[in-house]
């Protein structure tokens, strides 16, 4: 896991993002335990509270569950929820694109054309 | 956040040389590293001395660990490791004497662990040096070695970073994190520091002390949500000044800390908003409470 | 008791132990043997002077400055449940050790004279009353010098106290042995004085160390 100190993205967010993609990509499987909070803090050279906040965010998203005294384990990821998670990321990325388009003065049509063009390129 | 506390103090009061420490309620979270921040003379050392049990005349109640134990009786002392800036060892003790004495003073002192830590921190054990001839950095390392060689549950460290070089400060951070990890939620650290930036990545909870009172405290991640760092154009400085918590301005623009809840009042101004560092938050809180005349 | 002695021993460095427990007795007894064999006389006055001088100077490396304002804050001791006990043991055992050392070393010195001087002159060289006088006198001067020098942490104070103590010892010894009074009188006076200073040494140091838990 690599953390960027000056990326503008809070450290806990970076940890949560990376663990989330590991879970969604299946690298961390159902029932697997996340590294211990204090162990991960030690390895990443960050504070315990930052790690804890990342884990709590994943818990709030329903990706992991806290087991009393044993740490956090990965939940079963039902396909519906997985899809929802992915859709949320798509929406976020598209919103970002829309904002950039506004700044660039692109019209809605131009934006849709760009999207279509990019999709074609990808398929090819 | 729901956490237990390792130290609780109620109505803590201590008058000392014309200054008064007054803390109605103090709770240090268990399983975390807590930083005590404040100006010189804010009462940090006094507070740490009371908690470490090396000053006994004060009003109020301090209780420790889950069983709400009191300092008297000695059981609590065995579970606490303290390092401080005052004379700690007798000046002409040698390092091997310090080892002997530690074994006598504490049941849970492990000589093999002490020797390993000395080796690890390259404390000059082999050289027959007296404590008084050690550099401030080595003296600090020796104090850390004697407390870390014991099975403690709480470390109270008064300015551990100050005498250390940058490399050793980094090592100190590692040692604190390792101590917290070994305890798996049962080990806590409470330290005072002026070097907030150097200790930021090991600080979970921060307590800011001014004039003997706690003026701000909280988990660092919560404080980073409570305050934001705002930068804006010089033209908006006057209007922003009324809204911001603290502000500095120049002819190019202004910069300051704002309470997040007041952020919307800045609507209409051309400002950028960032997450502040603990160091920036602390300086802002200290600025807002200091009696120092700031221009 | 074992614990008390350990408390004392940890307060002394290896060099202190070597000098005080090995080198000093060997040198003193050597002087006594030499003086008895070569000069056919006792060296006990000189012997006492050296002992007082060395003990007062060496104390700088034992508890030098312990009664000085500020230096009593040995925070490490104060964080231990046994810190005060260890400190007190070190103070008391040191005094006991000192007294037994004075009794032993002068006793041995007298025995050397008795063995090497088979003639009747041996008894004249040093009588029992004089032996007690020299023990009480050297002990009292030693603890007095220690008591005074522990208020500062300067080596030169220990040196000064050592020199004054050893010279004063010689003078007092000469005066006492030449006065037409029974040895019991100066012996009793010195015993009371030495005992009193010993009690003060423990009391004052403990008041300082324990007092640093509180505001003064």
Image (cartoon, coloured by chain):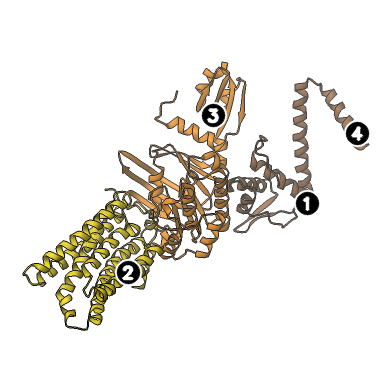
Chain colours: A brown, B orange, C yellow
The kind of secondary structure element at disc 1 is: loop
- Asked if disc 3 and disc 2 are in contact, CB closer than 8 Å, the reply is no
Reading the image, the residue beneath label 4 is A121
* Residue at x 58%, y 55% (from the top left corner): B181
Q: Nearer the viewer, mark 4 or mark 2?
A: 2
The reply to whether residue B258 is in sight is yes
Q: Decide: is B160 above or below A32.
A: above
Give residue A26's mark.
1
Gap in Å between the C-alphas at discs 2 and 1? 82 Å
- Tag 1, which chain? A
Residue nearest the observer in this picture, B122 or C28? C28
Neighbor class of circle 1 (other Cα within 10 Å; few <14, some 14-19, many 20+) is few
Gap in Å between the C-alphas at discs 3 and 1? 41 Å
- Asked if disc 4 and disc 2 are in contact, CB closer than 8 Å, the reply is no
Q: Residue furthest front?
A: C38
Q: Is residue C43 left or right of residue B284?
A: left
Reading the image, the residue beneath label 2 is C27
Classify the position of the N terminus of chain C by image quarter: bottom left
Neighbor class of circle 4 (other Cα within 10 Å; few <14, some 14-19, many 20+) is few
Residue nearest the observer in this picture, B64 or C102? C102
* Residue at x 47%, y 57% (from the top left corner): B147
Neighbor class of circle 3 (other Cα within 10 Å; few <14, some 14-19, many 20+) is many
């Amino acid at each position: 896991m690599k953390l960027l100190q000056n990326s503008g993205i809070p450290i806990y967010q970076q940890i949560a993002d990376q663990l989330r993609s590991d879970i969604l990509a299946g690298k961390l499987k159902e029932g697997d335990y996340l590294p211990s909070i204090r162990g991960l803090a030690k390895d990443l050279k960050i504070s315990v509270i930052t790690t804890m906040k990342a884990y709590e965010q994943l818990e709030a998203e329903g990706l992991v569950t806290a087991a009393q005294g044993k740490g956090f384990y990965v939940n079963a990821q039902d396909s519906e929820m997985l899809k929802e998670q992915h859709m949320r990321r798509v929406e976020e990325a598209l919103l970002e694109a829309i904002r950039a388009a506004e700044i660039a003065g692109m019209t809605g049509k131009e934006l849709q054309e760009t999207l279509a063009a990019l999709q074609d390129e990808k398929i090819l | 956040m729901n956490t237990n506390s390792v130290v609780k103090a109620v109505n803590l009061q201590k008058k000392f040389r014309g200054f008064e420490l007054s803390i109605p309620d103090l709770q240090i979270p268990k399983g975390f590293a807590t930083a005590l921040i404040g100006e010189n003379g804010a009462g940090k050392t006094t507070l740490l001395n009371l908690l470490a049990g090396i000053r006994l005349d004060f009003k109020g109640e301090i209780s420790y660990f889950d069983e709400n134990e009191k300092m008297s009786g000695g059981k609590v002392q065995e579970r606490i490791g303290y390092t401080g800036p005052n004379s700690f060892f007798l000046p002409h003790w040698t390092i091997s004497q310090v080892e002997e004495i530690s074994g006598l003073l504490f049941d849970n002192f492990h000589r093999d662990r002490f020797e390993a830590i000395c080796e690890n921190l390259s404390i000059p054990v082999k050289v027959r040096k007296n404590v008084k001839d050690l550099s401030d950095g080595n003296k600090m390392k020796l104090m850390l070695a004697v407390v870390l060689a014991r099975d403690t549950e709480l470390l109270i460290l008064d300015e551990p970073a100050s005498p250390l070089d940058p490399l050793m400060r980094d090592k100190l951070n590692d040692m604190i994190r390792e101590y917290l990890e070994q305890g798996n939620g049962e080990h806590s650290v409470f330290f005072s520091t002026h070097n907030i930036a150097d200790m930021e990545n090991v600080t979970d909870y921060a307590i800011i002390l001014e004039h003997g009172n706690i003026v701000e405290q909280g988990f660092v991640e919560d404080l980073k949500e409570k305050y934001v760092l705002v930068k804006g154009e010089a033209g908006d400085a006057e209007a922003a000044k009324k809204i911001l918590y603290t502000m500095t301005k120049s002819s190019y623009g202004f910069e300051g800390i704002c309470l997040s809840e007041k952020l919307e009042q800045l609507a209409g101004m051309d400002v950028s908003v960032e997450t502040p560092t603990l160091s920036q938050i602390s300086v802002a809180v200290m600025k807002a409470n200091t009696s120092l005349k700031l221009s | 008791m074992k614990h008390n002695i350990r408390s004392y021993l940890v307060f002394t460095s290896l060099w202190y132990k070597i000098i005080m427990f090995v080198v000093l007795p060997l040198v003193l007894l050597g002087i006594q043997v030499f003086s008895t064999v070569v000069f056919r006389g006792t060296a006990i006055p000189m012997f006492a002077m050296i002992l007082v001088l060395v003990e007062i100077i060496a104390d700088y490396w034992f508890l030098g400055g312990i009664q000085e304002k500020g230096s009593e804050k040995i925070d490490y001791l104060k964080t231990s449940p046994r810190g005060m006990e260890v400190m007190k043991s070190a103070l008391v055992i040191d005094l006991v050790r000192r007294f037994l050392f004075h009794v032993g070393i002068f006793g041995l010195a007298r025995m050397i004279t008795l063995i090497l001087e088979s003639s009747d002159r041996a008894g004249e060289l040093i009588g029992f009353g004089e032996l007690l006088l020299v023990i009480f006198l050297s002990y009292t001067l030693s603890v007095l010098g220690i008591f005074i020098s522990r208020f500062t942490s300067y080596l030169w104070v220990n040196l000064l106290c050592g020199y004054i103590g050893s010279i004063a010892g010689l003078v007092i010894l000469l005066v006492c042995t030449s006065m037409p009074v029974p040895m019991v009188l100066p012996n009793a006076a010195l015993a009371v004085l030495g005992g009193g200073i010993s009690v003060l040494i423990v009391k004052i140091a403990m008041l300082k160390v324990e007092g640093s838990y509180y505001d003064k």
